[in-house]
């Protein structure tokens, strides 16, 4: 009891102190961070794509302005001067083929619309001296950057610079240089707005998904919380009482966690049965051993006082003590058999046996040792049929069932054995016409030490372990042992064992003999 209390004390305070984050919180935080990373990557890719699209658009505007300027300036023959540049960059607006007005390029609404408000056009002579500028030029002219577009930062503003030589259409010689600068103010503003939008969008998405996942996880993990609460109740002060009454509630929705709750309840039911069987086992063993020990002690006390001098009393006491020792030995042996029956799948899982041969052998043996009984055999196997079970174990199970059939037959001393098979299994049925078993007791006859009528069973021998050993052996080989019975009409026990290929047949030699 101290061990349980110490374990409960360990489970209560330290674990709660070490528990910083619940599974739901971890799930929601992890989901939020995951969504934030996904949206961050998505936003970065989308931001890069939009930035490239905007930059290409600005390059097109600058390239269009450069092409227009080159077409106009290339009409000159000699090196460009201020007058020549201004004259060449003028727009002639005609009405009825008569020249009425002349506007400079940089003051023309058409050219201003064409080149946009942030684009500047500057013209330089062969000495790199500026002879014309449509607006204030934010960067100096660099002849090395000709024929290449560059991006520069001037006063925190991104500037796109493009330049080219001016080739005269008449002489095909270089007569000057032109440079286009595009102040990407709108480009920078749009990028900043996109960054802010994407940042807010990612944070809202992450927080929203985190809250949604927390609510969803709280709903989905409710079975875990209930299982945890159930375990806490079972670990309370009265474990045995809680184990008998506390269960995880059933859920309407069917999923893995609800199935986990169902399996947990099934495990608790099995544990409860084990606890009850253990208590019954201790009580029955104490009672079974107390009687022979008391008898032996009584005879030894009798002999110690005066019986050793009386040969008749001495002989009777020795005989009675030997009978009780034999009974105790039988009880211990059956308990060992039961313990071994729980490990048959590990030790004898690949053994193959001819079911017909063993069935006929047991039938003939009982027919010989019980001549006062009528034994009827119905063999439909029509030849050897192999099943996956160790030969001695199948023989042991059949002996247990046949022995019970003989013991509990009263007026009609008749036992039937039937051997048959279907596609997958061999069926061995043993039927008697004796006392029968009530429906109240039929579910418990396979429990350890359980006997329907203990007084009568003790008179007929046995310790109430036979059927428990038989079922454990059969189920250890993945077979089935079922019973049908009616009070006053007898009982029917049916064994079903899987059929195996005859090429896998083994000798059936007892592996324990070589150990």
Image (cartoon, grey):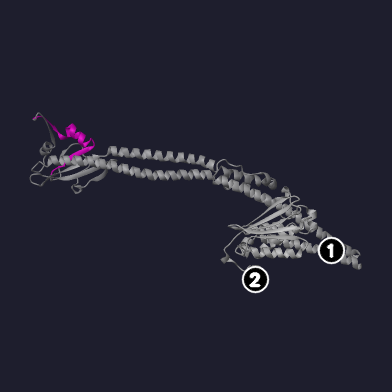
Frontmost residue, 63 versus 341: 341
Q: In which quarter of the image is residue 241?
A: top right
The disc, 1 or 2, on the residue closer to the chain's N-terminal end is: 1
User: Which stretch is magenta?
Assistant: 98-125
Of 188 and 67, the residue lying toward us: 67
Residue 142: x %, y % from top left:
19, 46
Q: Looking at the picture, how far across and down is residue 504, in whole percent?
A: 57, 66
Q: Does the magenta stretch include residue 101?
A: yes
**Residue of label 1:** 320
Residue 311 is at least partly visible in this image: yes
SS type, badge 1 = helix
Residue 201 placement, left or right of 490: left
Q: What element carries label 2?
A: helix
Q: Is 305 left or right of 113, judged from the image as shown?
A: right
The residue drawn where x is 69% and y is 65% is 361
Q: Quadrant of residue 120 in the image? A: top left
Residue 223 % position (x, y): 57, 43
Question: What residue did someone put label 2 on?
Answer: 514
């Amino acid at each position: 009891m101290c061990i349980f209390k110490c374990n409960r004390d360990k489970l209560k305070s330290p674990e709660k102190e070490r528990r910083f984050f619940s599974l739901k919180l971890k799930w929601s935080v992890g989901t939020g961070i995951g969504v934030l990373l996904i949206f961050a990557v998505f936003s970065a890719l989308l931001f890069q794509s939009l930035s490239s699209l905007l930059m290409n658009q600005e390059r097109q505007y600058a390239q269009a302005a450069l092409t227009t300027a080159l077409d106009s300036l290339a009409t000159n023959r000699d090196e460009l001067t201020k007058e020549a540049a201004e004259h060449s960059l003028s727009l002639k607006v005609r009405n009825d083929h008569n020249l009425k007005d002349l506007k400079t390029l940089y003051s023309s609404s058409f050219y201003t619309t064409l080149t946009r408000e942030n684009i500047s056009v500057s013209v330089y002579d062969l000495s790199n001296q500026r002879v014309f500028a449509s607006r204030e030029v934010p960067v100096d002219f660099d002849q090395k950057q000709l024929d290449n577009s560059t991006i520069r930062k001037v006063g925190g503003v991104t500037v796109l610079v493009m330049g080219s030589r001016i080739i005269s259409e008449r002489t095909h010689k270089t007569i000057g240089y032109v440079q286009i600068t595009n102040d990407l103010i709108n480009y920078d503003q749009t990028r900043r707005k996109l960054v802010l939008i994407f940042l807010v969008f990612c944070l809202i998405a992450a927080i929203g998904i985190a809250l949604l996942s927390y609510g969803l996880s709280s709903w989905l993990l409710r079975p875990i919380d209930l299982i945890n609460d159930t375990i806490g109740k079972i670990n309370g002060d009265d474990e045995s009482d809680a184990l008998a009454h506390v269960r995880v509630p059933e859920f309407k929705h069917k999923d893995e966690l609800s199935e986990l709750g169902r399996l947990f309840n099934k495990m608790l039911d099995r544990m409860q049965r084990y606890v009850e069987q253990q208590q019954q086992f201790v009580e029955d063993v104490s009672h079974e051993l107390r009687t022979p020990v008391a008898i032996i002690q009584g005879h030894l006390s009798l002999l110690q006082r005066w019986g050793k001098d009386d040969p008749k009393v001495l002989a009777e006491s020795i005989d009675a003590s030997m009978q009780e020792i034999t009974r105790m030995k039988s009880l211990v042996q059956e308990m060992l058999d039961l313990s071994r029956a729980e490990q048959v799948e590990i030790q004898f899982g690949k053994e193959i046996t001819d079911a017909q041969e063993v069935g006929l052998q047991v039938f003939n043996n009982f027919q010989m040792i019980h001549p006062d009984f009528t034994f009827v055999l119905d063999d439909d196997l029509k030849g050897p049929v192999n099943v996956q079970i160790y030969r001695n174990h199948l023989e042991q199970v059949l002996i247990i069932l046949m022995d019970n059939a003989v013991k509990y037959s009263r007026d009609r001393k008749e036992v039937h054995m039937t051997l048959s098979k279907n596609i997958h299994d061999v069926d061995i049925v043993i039927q008697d016409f004796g006392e029968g078993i009530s429906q109240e007791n039929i579910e418990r006859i396979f429990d350890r030490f359980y006997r329907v009528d203990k007084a009568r069973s003790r008179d007929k021998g046995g310790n109430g372990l036979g059927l428990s050993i038989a079922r454990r052996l059969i189920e250890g080989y993945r077979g089935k042992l079922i019973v049908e019975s009616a009070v006053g009409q007898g009982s029917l026990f049916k064994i079903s064992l899987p059929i195996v290929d005859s090429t896998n047949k083994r000798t059936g030699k007892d592996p324990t003999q070589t150990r």
